[in-house]
Amino acid sequence: MMPKFPFLKTKDPENKSKVFVPSRRDFLKLSSLATGGFILGVNFQCSGPKGELITFAPNVFITIDSDNLVTIIAHRSEMGTGIRTSLPMIVADELGADWSKVKIVQAEGDEEKYGDQNTDGSYSVRMFYEPMRKAGATARHMLITAAAAKWGIAASECHTEDAQVVSSGGKKIKFGDLVEQLKTMEMPDPETVTLKDFSSYKLIGKDVAIYDAHDMAKGEAKFGADIDLPGMQIAVIRRCPVVGGKVKSFNDEKALAVPGVNRVVKIEGAGIPPGLDKPLEGVAVIADNTWAAMKGRDVLEIEWDLGENQNYSSAKQLEEMLKSTSGNGQVRRERGNFNTAQQASGQIIERTYVAPFYAHATMEPPAAIAHVHGDGTCEIWAPTQHPQWARQAVAQALEMDYQNVKMNITLLGGGFGRKSKPDFVVEAALLSKAAKAPVRVQWTREDDLHHDFYHAQSAQRIRAVLDKNGNLSGWNHHTVFPAIGATANSAEIHPSDGELGLGCIDFPYEVPNIRIETHESKAHTRIGWLRSVSNIHHSFAINCMLDEIAEAKGVDPVDFVFNLLAEDKDLDFAGELKGDFGNYGEPLDKFPWNTRRLRGVIEKVAQEANWKKALTDGKSVGFAVHKSFLTYVACIVQVEKGSNGQIIIPEVHYAVDCGIGVNTDRIRSQFEGGAQFATSLVMTSAITFENGRVQQNNFDGYQVIRMPQSPKKIHVHIVDSMEKPTGVGEPPVPPFIPALCNAIYKLTGERIYQLPFKS
Amino acid sequence: MATFNLNINGKSQSVDVDPNTPILWVLRDQLDLVGTKYGCGIAQCGSCTVIMDGNAVRSCSIPVSAAEGTKITTIEGLSENGDHPVQKAWMEHDVPQCGYCQAGQIMSAVALLESNPNPSDTDIDNAMNGNICRCGTYVRIKKAIKTAAKS
């Protein structure tokens, strides 16, 4: 009998189904679960005879011990964004904890207890800012009530600071000393507790150092492969080099002869489609140590049935994709009549843009540890962005109820979307079952680059019509790329509404005639999502084209783009879209598409970068603006020629409007890193396929930028805002790409129509 | 299999392994020193950087048989309490994002400053060219190296 998976959803790449809107109901759900197995209204976790430690746990995110230790749960995965710091610090600030003494504990994967844990789509802060504040405020309210009762004064005379309740008269009591008293207190409704005034926050809105910095600097931070279990064995897998291929036969004699190798196990793949959560077909070598497993794999003899993708050439497909964009496609947005505009044109500018497959290349290649026990339970340690999906996928593979899978989350050595997919976790589980021992599956860098869920290659064609007065009167954007959905369903041959909603269909400019079309392309490999997803290629094409139109008109590109936007308007694209606009899972009335905010970042970046002066000084500067993941970002990049003629990037300016800036230092660090990440996409990185196989093996073939090529100074100007906070993990990438391309054009006189551009 | 006597972080240790085993896997699998990370296996990314006789080397590409008679320092051996000037500078600038490459970055920086206490921007670029950070913390790494150089 198939086990039940109450949380198993069909994975949609746009995160729509994963995103819940933090509402009163949702928070009540969290807070009612908050008693964590205890009777509702009983708000302490355990109490023993006097002198023993008592723990107050008003909700799942906070515990306060009678020895005054405040522990806050981090329930989202840490892959470098700082979320393990930024959400707990919200709780701590509302609570009035002593941040320097707060202990942060990583939650297990448990949706029933913690709600959504899928760390993806730049929505952790957006989704949990309010619930975290309420969690902290609820506990603060109770502590203050207890202290006020003890002192016989009004609660309004008390506040909290440094893990104490303090009265206006100067009395102080530690949180820990109130825990006993809280036993009999009723829990207030988290929805009605008063939140602190923003101006009184000591952490929110400030630069707060990451919790793990010390461990990381000491080499003590634990990532996926760092967990050691008694009797653990190491597995390295030879996967079919072509997606969809199968093992015809294999000979493990030589592999088993390698000292330390214990067994060789075949893993069955899903075939075609390969699936977003399934392992690829392969043969695993399980050994006492990593080196033996690798040596054993080297001498495995496997005969493959390579299947239908064995002749796949990405270059050939790209050519066909590009060709298709000159014909009529499936119309996905229509405003006015583009054909009429074209007929009345003064000038038509038509350009094509192509971008390659990209691999995530997280510094930590996938690795996971599983221990399948004889009693039908399983314990996992994995660097996963999506603990719940991994838990469900493991349960399904082992034909086990998901509740029998304990999912421990380690730090992630980079994620960028790769570690959302649980394929490598499932591999560990299957191999532990086969080996009847704890197993760590270790991907090599070659495995990582050969068997990723790639950002899809793309071809785009934009026709811009200028009327006889030189105004932009028509915009016809063709886009084609293999869809993420095709990885799970081969019938998906057009980009989805969700993928188009990432910076293509939501073209925000006041052009009277717009037509956006898509074309067919099949997936011949596993397609996934990479930091900012299809915003990558859409922003590239749109912003490079706008720069070229401004040039044709003889106007400043910043002024041109600024003036092309309607003033102070919320866009809804009503009546123009042929499908849905996802708005990153949020309703438009709650998170409007606001042109004022986009204009705001344009103005700010131009001012901070001293754009006009840079132009008159003859600097090679490029500009672009792009909203993604509900965050508004404008970017100005400056380039120069280095002593060897190579392109260097001395300075970058970003203006970002992400609403309330929760941890301003981590906002800056995400933008600093986003600029570097995007530089690789423009300058160095590409995955290509021939005969169905990836042609890049390691960092010598799939190059990413190093310190000498990296932007030297990155200024991040955060717009002062009290709007609801939105994410910053992905939004730095899309506008940087065309801003850099436009700057390079200024320097070299050559437009960039194909990524990567190699100087 | 053969026995090798190694000097790691000032401590003599003996391991019985295949002579071709890279130092990286001896550190991680045999000696439980997992601060040193695997990133590429071909000396391209620097995640596995350790200091061998004063030089930053890629432990993924040096067999254990070449380690006898040398002195190796790993991230764990840099300081007892995380107070080496480079580690302190790393914390002052809040350098890490995901943190995975940072042990390798720190070891390269330490080796640079030991041989060149006052490096120029170009010196830093050259010394750190072998260490990839995919999160893109390069700006802060450079700042931290300069801060450490001053201390």
Image (spheres, coloured by chain):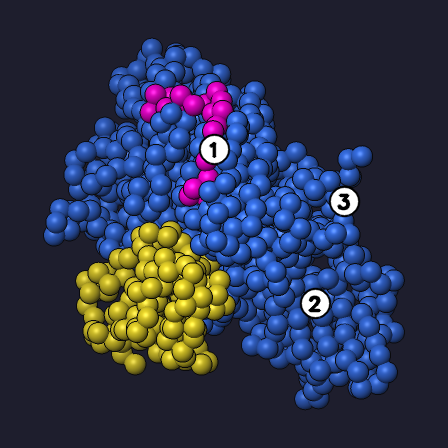
Chain colours: A blue, B yellow
10 Å crowding of disc 3: few (<14), some (14-19), many (20+): some
Query: Real-space Cα distance between discs 2 and 3?
Result: 28 Å
Question: Is residue A300 a member of the stretch shown in magenta?
Answer: yes
Query: Real-space Cα distance between discs 3 and 1?
Result: 34 Å
Identify the residue at image location x=59%, y=77%.
A101
Q: Which mark is residue A401?
A: 3
Q: Residue furthest bottom?
A: A170
In the displayed structure, A405 sits above or below B90; it is above
Q: Is label 2 or label 3 in front?
A: 3
Q: Which mark is residue A62?
A: 2
Query: Real-space Cα distance between discs 2 and 1?
Result: 52 Å
10 Å crowding of disc 1: few (<14), some (14-19), many (20+): some
10 Å crowding of disc 2: few (<14), some (14-19), many (20+): many
Rendered location of residue A165, percent (x, y)? 70, 81
Q: Is label 3 or label 1 in front?
A: 1
Q: Which residue is more in the foreground, A59 or B122? A: B122
Rendered location of residue A205, percent (x, y)? 51, 64
Stretch in magenta:
A297-317
Chain bearing tag 2 is A
Element marked by disc 1 = strand
Element marked by disc 3 = loop
Identify the residue at image location x=25%, y=76%.
B114
**Marks 2/3 same chain:** yes
Position of the C terminus of chain A, as image quadrant, is top left
